[in-house]
Amino acid sequence: MNKDQIIEALSYVEDPDLKKDLVSLGMIQDLSINGAEVAFDLVLTTPACPMKESIVNACKNAIYTMVNSEAIVKINITSNVQQSRDDQSVLSGIKNIIAVASGKGGVGKSTFAINLSRTLAISGAKVGLMDADIHGPSIPTLMNTVDKKPEMDGDLMVPIENQGVQTMSIGYMVDTKQALVWRGPMLSKAISQFCSDVKWGNLDYLIIDLPPGTGDIHLSVVQHIPISGVVLITTPEEVAVADTRKAIDMFRNPHISQNILGIVENMSFFQPDENGEKYYIFGKEGGQKLSKESSVDFLGEIPIKENKKFDNIHKDYLAITGKIVQKLSILAASK
């Protein structure tokens, strides 16, 4: 058993998203053989890869079948997150930027943005969360950082880290009980400063929590920040779906033209018992129907679940996060 045999066997294992073999993709590194023991690093395109277990099993089976059925295969899973953004003139240290938007307020957009950020951070990614909802910043409250104030490193504000996520919000700089009555130019300046005056450093993913609706801040974000794609949050009822339809039209407008990664349906149902009956309080399958109608991918549904402290990640977030990072990895590979 030698390295050439192992490499040849692994060249038959394909990345299910990128549709190329692991060897040509450079995902097999530091291969060593010691007697019957084979060890190597499997370098994934994201630590949140939902296919990691199946890829590991495929590697082992290829070695057992083509080289040595008695081999002891030790695989160290690591990752090298790829960059999906074309323009690095702004926030140059950040590989992927995901905007989370909704047509209507109250659909759980900020809650989703936080759980997406935390799911990525728990997987091992370097993650930031920018609260771009200037009029109604909720990230400090939801992240339990409302009393924190950013420190300064020279001329740059240092993001406030909590639960592995670097966060920045206008809520850290003004009284959260104070209403901000700002016009477009002031909103645009605030977004610009969140890019130029914050020490984000090198991140794998930056999540931007946009305000609900379609307005000045959305325009400011897409004008100032080259984002990788947008995730839209809706609830099943028709009024939320109708507003999400407008948001899709906005992001598809030729003057904005952003990549819509998919639709998430929040508050899909309430299930008191894990295996019990589901109650569709706000209607049923509104997000799925909008997905088909608008030809936008449906990323998944999230049930109503109390989790105020964000101390647990619901399994539905794991699946949805996996789909999002898959799309970004495919996008990065196409660059």
Image: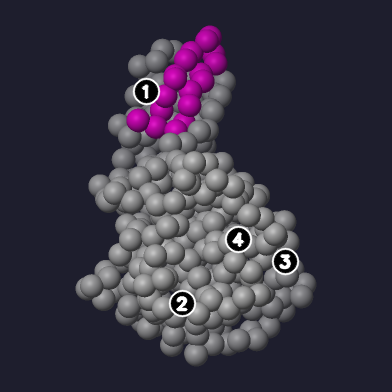
Residue at horizontal 22%, vertical 73%?
Answer: 254
Main SS class of the magenta portion in the image: strand
| Marks 1 and 2 close (CB-CB < 8 Å) | no
In the rendered structure, which amino acid carries the disc numbered 2? Answer: Trp
Q: Disc 1 or disc 2, which is closer to the eye?
A: 2
Estimate how packed mark 3 is, as few (under 14), some (14 to 19) or many (20 or more) residues with alpha carbons within 10 Å: few
Residue at horizontal 45%, vertical 57%?
Answer: 194
The magenta-colored residue range is: 26-43
Please give the residue where the numbered disc 3 appears in the rendered image. Answer: 308
Q: Reply above or below: 147 against 177.
A: above
| Residue 218 seen in render | no
In the rendered structure, which amino acid carries the disc numbered 4? Answer: Tyr
How far apart are the two marked residues, 2 and 4, measured between alpha carbons? 17 Å
Depth check: give the residue in front, 98 or 11: 98
In the rendered structure, which amino acid carries the disc numbered 1? Answer: Ile
| Marks 1 and 3 close (CB-CB < 8 Å) | no
Residue 214: % across, % down: 39, 79
How far apart are the two marked residues, 3 and 4, measured between alpha carbons? 20 Å
Q: Disc 1 or disc 3, which is closer to the eye?
A: 3
Q: Tag on residue 182?
A: 2
